[in-house]
Amino acid sequence: MISIDPLQGTERDNYKLLVGTIIPRPIAFVTTLGDEGVLNGAPFSYFNIVSSNPPMISVSIQHTGAGQSKDTARNIKHTKEFVVHIVDQQNVGQVNMTAAPLPPDQSEVSLAGLTPVDSLHIVVPGIKEAKVRMECVLEHCLELPNNDLIIGRIVQFHIDEEIYEQGRIDPVQLGAVSRLAGNNYAGIGEIFEIERPV
């Protein structure tokens, strides 16, 4: 695993990492810590690059049916920290399991059999099964009707050695998947279907 401090690179370096990993119409698997230290994990497809200088990403998290912030948004607003992972063809099945509606005192990460791994600059752990993870601190939260727009500043990139070469990301080796409508997902050049838990 290669760890990259975005402050040590140029804007172009950070730009290449962002555009190389956030493809195509990606899914952000976000880990946060709840009030009791429970590791929360959830996937979000309203996710993109905001800026490469400084490196920032956005995740829009819709409210629950009752109009309340979801656990992920509530945790981020409270701790000001979270980890974003790129979902790929190897971990998408486990990530999909984390979409199950669980109470705040139960960990979706444990349910899915994912492996927590310590972060370098924040308290919130990431997961070992992702080829790309980004430690983030909350830059801004815009509370919109029916959703929380989270803007996070990346304070550390973690990139699997197999997909990284001379500052660039190999999109085929990354194998990022994207969320489509219904139960459909897309890989690089293919579409597949996976049912979400009820």
Image: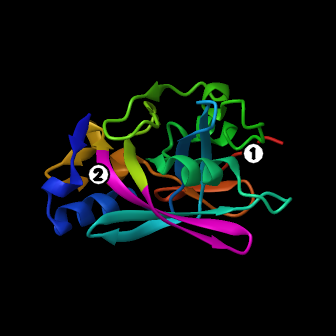
Q: Residue at x 62, y 45 (%)?
A: 42
Is 89 or 156 nearer to us in this picture?
156
* Image-based side of 159 in relation to 85, left or right: left
Q: Looking at the picture, which amino acid does disc 1 mark?
A: Glu
Whether the residues at callouts 1 and 2 have beta carbons within 8 Å, the answer is no
Image spot of residue 148 (x, y percent): 63, 65
Q: Residue at x 55, y 42 (%)?
A: 32
Residue 184 higher or lower than 161, as above or below: below
Q: Name the secondary structure under disc 2.
A: loop
* Image-based side of 133 in relation to 196, left or right: left
* Image-based side of 132 in relation to 1, left or right: right
Residue 50 seen in the current view: yes
Q: Residue at x 19, y 68 (%)?
A: 11
Disc 1: CA contacts within 10 A as few (<14), some (14-19) or many (>=20):
few
Q: Earlier in the sequence, mark 1 or mark 2?
A: 2
Image spot of residue 126 (x, y percent): 45, 36
Residue 143 higher or lower than 153, as above or below: below
Residue 66 higher or lower than 160, as above or below: below
* Image-based side of 150 in relation to 121, left or right: right
Distance in Å between CA atoms under marks 1 and 2: 28 Å
Circle 1 residue: 195
Residue 191 seen in the current view: no
- The magenta stretch spans which residues? 138-157
Q: Is residue 63 magenta?
A: no
Residue 151 higher or lower than 41, as above or below: below
Of the 4 image quadrants, the one containing the C terminus is top right
Q: Looking at the picture, which amino acid does disc 2 mark?
A: Asp
Is 68 or 17 nearer to us in this picture?
68
Disc 2: CA contacts within 10 A as few (<14), some (14-19) or many (>=20):
few
Q: Which mark is residue 170?
A: 2
Magenta part, dominant SS: strand
Image spot of residue 92 (x, y percent): 57, 42
